[in-house]
Every structure is written in structure tokens, then in C-alpha cells.
Amino acid sequence: MHAGSTLFFDVAAQRDCWPGGAWPLVGAEEAANVARLFALAARLGIRQGGAVCLHAHPGVGADAPTSAGASGRGEAIAVDATPDAPPHCLAGTEGTQRAPACDPSKPLRCWTRGRDPAAAVDLDRAHADYVASGCAATPDAPPLFARVLDHVTAGIRDAVVLGAGIEHGLDRAVDALLRRRIRTHVALDATGSATPEHAQQVIAGWKRRFVDVTTTAMIERLLTRAD
């Protein structure tokens, strides 16, 4: 694993999915490990991107505006939601904001549903690009998101997945990366789940598909062994 060909892909690294949030999937120990990986990415210049939750307020329909900045504050975004999940990451609330120590080293740019795929012409390497796919949908389902993910993963050999929702957003992210024939690693001690039993089933499925289920310490070791 080399820093120049590695992507850190984080899912729902937002306040509502962290300790004290509306849907705290990630515990304190896991949150600390996520922060370690963000610091490692900044130190080594590792490419970063990911998926975020940005849900509409109750009663807002699917034809709501779909334009958002990095935080989504003040916007009404309709995205797929996980069944039975409590209200979380509602547009315009503090819960959509980045979790502590989870800001990428480059300016975060969030792409939302409803935008013309031609807007992806603005993709560059000066930003950390994220898609607002929510907690239930694949991060490359709409054509625009597919173009963004193709850009984020271009030239990437290894991807490290971390964040909230092993059996939800993380599983969809792993699927999207494997479809692009990228060696995929999941730092389990930097992830959280809603239902441990379901998460274990997902992890078993990853192993059958040759996903590297690993730890934060091992990722650090693999990326810094040449130092």
C-alpha cells in the first residue's frame, strides 16, 4: 500500500452519527481511530473522499431543492434513508456537520442529487469530493455520483473505508469500490454499526469477497513502512 495510490473513503463522519448525536453509530474508541486516520491522511497527502447523509426535514418531498455546500445547512435534500433509523443528519441542523477531527485536508465539496451530470466537469484535485448518497443508497447510483466516484478513484489501487454504518453506507461503499476493482480495506476499529449481529453478517460477506478487514494500526503500518 502506497500513499500516492491510496484513497481514504469515509462514510457519514458527521456529528449525528458520532457519540452524543441523534444516531450514534460510532463509539468513542472508534471515533478516536477515525481521527487518527484523518490525521494520517493529512500527514501523508492521501486522497480523501466519501459519502454523507443529508436528509430532508419531515414532510419535504423528493422534488425539494438539491443543492448543497459542504455542510448542507439551510438546504432540503431528499435522499434514500435507512428504514427504522431515527431522524438524523437533517438538512440545516448541526448534526450534518463534520464530526470532530474529521475535516479532510483539502476543502470539502459535496455533490447532491438532482444536479446535471455535466456539472462534474468542475472536478479537480484541489477538493475532497463527497456525494450525498445518504445512509442507504450506493454512492454511485445516480450518473452524477458515478462520475464523481470515478474521479475520486482514478489511479487508486487501495481504498480504506471508515466511518458510520457497517451494514448501511459502508457496505454500499465497499460494493462500489469492488466494482471498480480497487483493493478494499475496512478499518473495523474505525467504524460503527447499528446492529452488531447484522454487521457481523456483512463483515463475513466482505471476507468472502476478499475485502481486507483490518485495524487502524495496520493501515498506519502499511502506509508508513517506507518512512
Image (spheres, rainbow, N blue to C red):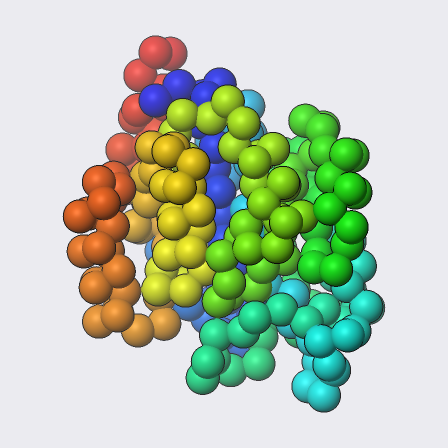
Seen at 74% across and 82% down, the residue is 60
Q: Is residue 11 left or right of residue 192?
A: right
Q: Is residue 149 left or right of residue 85?
A: right
Q: Is residue 196 left or right of residue 113?
A: left
Q: Is residue 227 left or right of residue 46?
A: left
> Taking 169 as reference, is 181 above or below it?
above
Pick the quarter of the image with the N terminus. Answer: top left
> Taking 21 as reference, is 163 above or below it?
above
Q: Quadrant of residue 27?
A: bottom left
Pick the quarter of the image with the C terminus. Answer: top left
Seen at 40% across and 41% down, the residue is 179
User: Residue 32: horizontal and vertical position, in percent?
Assistant: 42, 50
> Exactly how many numbered labels are in the figure?
0
Seen at 30% across and 26% down, the residue is 221
Whether residue 161 appears in this view of the structure is no
Q: Quadrant of residue 195?
A: bottom left
